[in-house]
Image (spheres, rainbow, N blue to C red):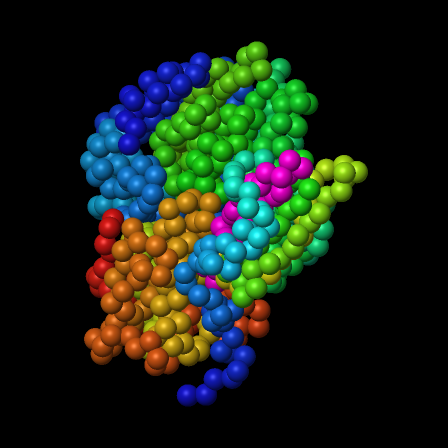
Amino acid sequence: MISRRDFLQASMAASAVVGASGFGNWARLAAQQALTQDQLLEFDTFGNVSLIHVTDIHAQLKPIYFREPEMNLGVGDNRGLVPHVTGAEFRRLYGIDDGSPSHYALTYDDFTALAREYGRMGGMDRVATVVKAIRAARPDALLLDGGDTWHGSYTCFHTQGGDMVNVMNALAPDAMTFHWEFTLGQDRVRELVDGLPYAALGQNIFDAMWDEPAEHFKPYELFERGGTLIAVIGQAFPYMPIANPGWMFPDYTFGIRDENMAAMVEEVRGQGAELVVVLSHNGFDVDKKMAATVPGIDVILSGHTHDALPEPVLVGETIVVASGSNGKFVSRVDLDVRDGRMMGFRHKLIPVFADVIEPDAEMAAVIDEQRAPFEAELTEVIGKTESLLYRRGNFNGTWDDLICDALLAERDAEIAMSPGVRWGPSLIPGQDITREDIWNVTSMTYPNAYRTEMTGEFLHVVLEDVADNLFNVDPYYQQGGDMVRTGGLGYRIDVTKEQGDRITDMTLLATGEPIDPARSYVVAGWASVNEGTEGPPIWEVVESHIRKQGTVSVGQNDSVTVVGA
Amino acid sequence: MIFSRRETLALGLGAAALGVLPFRVNAATEDAIAEFAGGADVGEGGITLIAPEIAENGNTVPIEVDAPGATEVMVLAAGNPLPGVATFKFGPLAGSQHASTRIRLAGTQDVIAVAKMADGSVVQTSALVKVTIGGCGG
């Protein structure tokens, strides 16, 4: 683990790159309980280039609560390294005071109490204020969107991403890359990309038939800013047809393709690029490996795994920046680029405290316009929660426990499975649950809640397969989600083992009996990647369940025993 | 309880055919490599094999081999019932010793490429290709 001081020393020892982060600043101010917008945005403009990074917004136009993970295990070489550090250990690492706003923004514990004190975060109108303030200081700053933008809400689903395109067009990024966008289906993606006034990038988006770069997506874009030629190379999520339904975008193939990334870096350097930025949806550990494998990348703006890090991580001479999710944070990276190379950087992870940062009036109007046609449906109260509802974490979260309960009850199943996605904001105790809240944790284009039979042996294969996507020691074999959530089924997992040996002690919770490999179990789940999956959409299942409960309460879940953490 | 056949097409039926453990080098592949090498020691370097880390579709996995100076390159899928995939032969007039194709993989396994050089030396490389049910990303 690199401490803040070690990090700065390491960066200077490794190269001419000199770095600084504005993090300590807002942490300290936060501790004084004296947050103002000016303080959050304070930044001594540095060098000659500014990058602004937003990523994984998941269509959250309005401020939300979002609890960061309690458990986010790293394996292999990444064991114990950020972002696999949580809670108090994370706060000690970055010198964050307990109870401070940065404690609330970046770690999970005491979430309910701190949420009541510091309020919601995010909101694209607040993000617009941050972006405009940075552009006031550096008018030609590059704004880069890491993707997972056109997915994740009621309005986004019903407009097929149109609401987010309108909002992002108002924010005017310079480029974006992709992941969940493709689950809109390839025709809709091409239609939206055709209309974008900015670059749609992905060096790893290939035509499936010819295995050649795909027509609608350029590998990179060159920008001249501050007298500097900057190359921004896109890296879409590598495993889209595996983690998401490939039948929705059969014309495309992806993969990491680091040999092609290396070729693109050489190509842009050959065209005179002095700064090479990768706008990535790889996930943090994959980006670290790519930084170590592909020479010549100066900055990786990392997305997909939803990590928020107050400082960049240095890999060789590459800085890797993680900017969180759901609109909670905006990263600003100022760079000193001289003589064809990056000489230094100054970075700040700007927390978007919704009650501190003034909404931008123009953007607020654009957002209201998107939501107006759906206002009645969005705001309908379905129930109330007595418990904190959250999703993030390697294993079950309370939102997923509630969804699994809904599947067991409404679909008359013995076992429920819910995908280990990382999106979905939180609700704090006492809050109403609106239809919008349910859609925020379930919205997708393949929502059917299936009901099927699986043998105990097959259930084991499923758990082992998903676990290997998360805990394979080689990041290039990880897909970046969390473990599939289970209802009615307990198990023990040793994260240090290899595929086939991690999952043991599978138990049917209703009877306490071990899962019999030969017996068939009735399983309900959702988000199957298979074409033709039948069943009601998951949001109807969850809504029906919550209506019957009136007020929901989710107890402690200790059905998964984690070993080797 | 009635559910249709379609409903049973749920999570990852394709995985029913999957073994859990990857197939690594076995006797059949070792024999094939020894026969190809014809007694020469099998070294490393000078051959590049590009394959996806995780296959999008195990039935059609794109691979590429590049072995400058090779006269022959053999590709094996160690975990397939019949490991032999292809042998590419390059004549003296070949502009490059590079080939790409798509192969079928029965499950997670090593793909192996072995090249015989003009001087008779033999080099080998491999890549682990994972065939997975698929899950859900962030």
Q: Quadrant of residue A468?
A: bottom left
Q: Nearer the viewer, residue A359 or A526?
A: A526
Above or below A264: residue A385: below
Residue B128 in sight in this render: yes
Q: Nearer the viewer, residue B107 or B6?
A: B107
Q: Which residue is pictured at 58% across the width and 41% down the height?
A: B122
Q: Is residue B128 left or right of residue A38?
A: right
- Which percent across, then down, holds residue A66? 35, 47
Q: Is residue A521 above or below residue A99?
A: below
Quadrant where the N terminus of chain A is found in the figure:
top left
Question: Looking at this rendering, what residue extends furthest in the bottom direction?
Answer: B1
Q: Nearer the viewer, residue A228 or A27?
A: A228
Which residue sits furthest front? B39
Q: Residue at x 56, y 26 (%)?
A: A276
Q: Report x, y in % for residue B71.
A: 69, 42
Q: Which residues are magenta?
A: B110-135
Q: Is residue A194 visible?
A: no
| Predominant secondary structure, magenta span | strand
Residue drawn at 24 percent across, 74 percent down = A514
Counting the numbered discs, the total is: 0
Tell me where residue A253 appears, x and y as whole percent.
Answer: 62, 52
Q: Position of residue B132 (x, y in %)?
A: 48, 60
- Residue drawn at (51%, 84%), measured in percent from left and top? B4
Assess whether residue B119 is covered by the magenta stretch.
Answer: yes
